[in-house]
């Protein structure tokens, strides 16, 4: 992609209404723009990151046998009347009336629809267990949308739903999803802290939140320091709770081994038994021809919130430092002297060679060196290849690692070799 063709309206101004780093940086890097309170346009740089995040999620969901579908964003209110949640959900739900006075709503979550799809098709115990998931937009009319996309009103969520014959089977699926979530977040470069959670409005009796440590997080976490070095297998059994559940009088962990940190909730999983299957009459016939109401669970990931959480975890005073697997591009080529023929020729050569196997942003814009270097650090692509006339006259270009800030001089062939065949 040529930067001259790339829609990335970067800005040097620090937006006065953005209080946390991720919100400021997303605005400054031209990733998002507010359309209304808690509702954002997603611009190309952010979309590229969203797509990377979604790809990781989908690959990990595939591995555990979850099926991708799209439920709908607009749902008939009837389904929620069946489950009994229509009135309970309160003002967070955006209620819609169509031209025939039919009652609809914009999905804040999709348990009812998942149950509806299940009951339409699965009639026998042989169809169990099964898992459906989607990545789709949600709307919740939050009282206090804030911190940009961190707590939006419209946001992108991965939501999955499982159906099992027995509690044991449901528990097995829950554990499988738990481990898969740990892998999912680690692939994004994050260190997830799974905490035992109150299950809140969705209800139930087994629930974990996945938190990312960040000073700007809204949750306070209390956890055994062993958690930071535990294997994925051990994680579920190590003490970790949010402040809602923490009671110093009953804490099983001595004070000197207890960590207290702020966290951002990026995922939440629940087991809730027959909470929807029974009232919505979603049953299958068991071996003896008896009605069996499946044991259900739901599994959420805050896809759009993750972008902000990743930036909170990986930034410095100059901008974003994307972890490799979620970066919008693998590498950027900066032409510092666009009127110099040699610079243009070498940049084109590097750009063409690297584009065969990497995602490359070539900054071919005519603007000052300072602005180019500033934008590159702001946007945070992991590697910068800096081509300037002085170095080039001596046969070199610079390769900068955005995160470590290390800069090395390499010949053109060497720099190409670094990225090709890697
Ligand atoms: P919170 O306590 O932050 O409101 P929640 O418990 O209401 O979250 P869930 O219903 O479990 O959230 O949704 C699954 C995931 O969706 C959450 O873990 C979070 O990452 C994300 N999420 C929830 N609400 C929002 C929001 N308003 N904006 C962005 N992401 C959100
Ligand atoms: Mg909420």
Image (tube, rainbow, N blue to C red):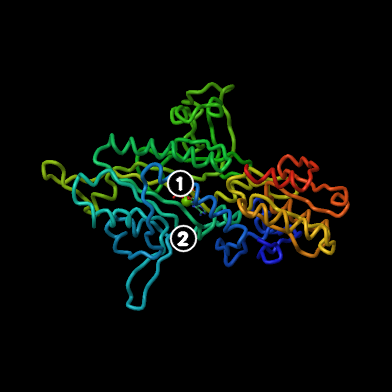
Count of picture labels: 2
In the displayed structure, 169 sits above or below 360; it is above
Question: Of the residues under marks 2 and 1, which one precedes in the sequence?
Answer: 1
Q: Is residue 30 left or right of residue 236?
A: right
Residue 370, x across and y down, in percent: 83, 56
Q: Quick one: label 2, few (<14), some, or many (20+) residues within 10 Å? A: many
Quadrant location of the N terminus in the rendered image: bottom right
Q: Residue at x 50, y 51 (%)?
A: 54
In the displayed structure, 250 sits above or below 307; it is above
Q: Residue at x 50, y 50 (%)?
A: 55
State the residue lying farthest toward the left.
288
**What residue sits right under mark 2 in the picture?**
139
Residue 375, x across and y down, in percent: 74, 56
Residue 52, x across and y down, in percent: 54, 51
Q: Quadrant of residue 92?
A: bottom left
Q: 400 or 310, which lies in front? A: 400
What is the spatial separation of the Cα atoms under label 2 and label 1, in whole angstroms?
26 Å
- Mark 1 lies on a secondary structure that is helix
User: Does the beta carbon of the residue at mark 1 sit less than 8 Å from ligand 1?
Assistant: no
The numbered dot on residue 59 is 1
The numbered dot on residue 3 is none
Q: 29 or 384, which lies in front? A: 384
Q: Nearer the viewer, mark 2 or mark 1?
A: 1
Mark 2–mark 1 CB contact (< 8 Å): no
- Mark 2 lies on a secondary structure that is strand
């Amino acid at each position: 992609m040529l930067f001259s063709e790339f829609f990335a309206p970067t800005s040097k101004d620090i937006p006065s209404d953005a209080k946390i780093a991720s919100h400021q940086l997303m605005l400054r890097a031209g990733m998002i723009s507010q359309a209304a309170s808690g509702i954002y346009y997603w611009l190309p740089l952010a979309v590229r990151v969203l797509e990377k995040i979604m790809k990781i999620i989908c690959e990990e969901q595939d591995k555990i046998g979850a099926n991708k579908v799209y439920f709908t964003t607009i749902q008939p209110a009837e389904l929620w009347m069946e489950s009994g949640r229509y009135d309970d959900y309160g003002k967070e739900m955006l209620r819609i009336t169509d031209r025939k006075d039919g009652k609809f709503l914009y999905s804040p979550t999709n348990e009812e629809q998942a149950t509806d799809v299940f009951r339409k098709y699965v009639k026998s115990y042989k169809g169990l267990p099964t898992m459906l998931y989607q990545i789709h937009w949600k709307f919740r009319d939050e009282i206090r949308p804030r911190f940009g996309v961190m707590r939006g009103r419209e946001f992108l969520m991965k939501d999955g739903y499982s159906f099992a014959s027995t509690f044991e089977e449901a528990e097995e699926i829950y554990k499988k999803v738990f481990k898969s979530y740990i892998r999912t977040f680690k692939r994004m470069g994050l260190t997830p802290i799974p905490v035992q959670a109150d299950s809140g409005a969705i209800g139930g009796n087994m629930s974990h939140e996945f938190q990312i440590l960040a000073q700007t997080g809204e949750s306070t976490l209390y956890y055994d320091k062993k958690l930071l070095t535990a294997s994925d297998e051990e994680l579920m059994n190590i003490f970790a709770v949010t402040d809602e559940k923490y009671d110093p009088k009953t804490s099983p962990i001595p004070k000197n081994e207890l960590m207290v940190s702020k966290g951002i909730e990026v995922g939440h999983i629940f087991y809730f038994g027959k909470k929807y299957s029974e009232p919505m009459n979603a049953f299958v016939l068991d071996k003896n021809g008896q009605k069996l109401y499946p044991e259900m669970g739901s599994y959420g990931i805050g896809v759009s919130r993750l972008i902000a959480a990743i930036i909170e975890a990986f930034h410095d005073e100059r901008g974003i430092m994307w972890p490799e697997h979620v970066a919008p591009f693998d590498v950027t080529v900066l032409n510092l002297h666009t009127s110099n023929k040699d610079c243009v020729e070498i940049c084109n050569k590097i750009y063409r060679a690297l584009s065969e196997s990497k995602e490359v942003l070539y900054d071919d814009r005519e603007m000052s060196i300072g602005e180019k270097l500033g934008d590159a650090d702001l946007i945070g692509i992991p590697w910068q290849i800096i081509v300037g006339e002085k170095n080039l006259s001596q046969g070199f270009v610079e390769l900068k690692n955005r995160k470590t800030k290390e800069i090395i001089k390499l010949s053109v062939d060497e720099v190409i070799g670094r990225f090709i065949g890697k």
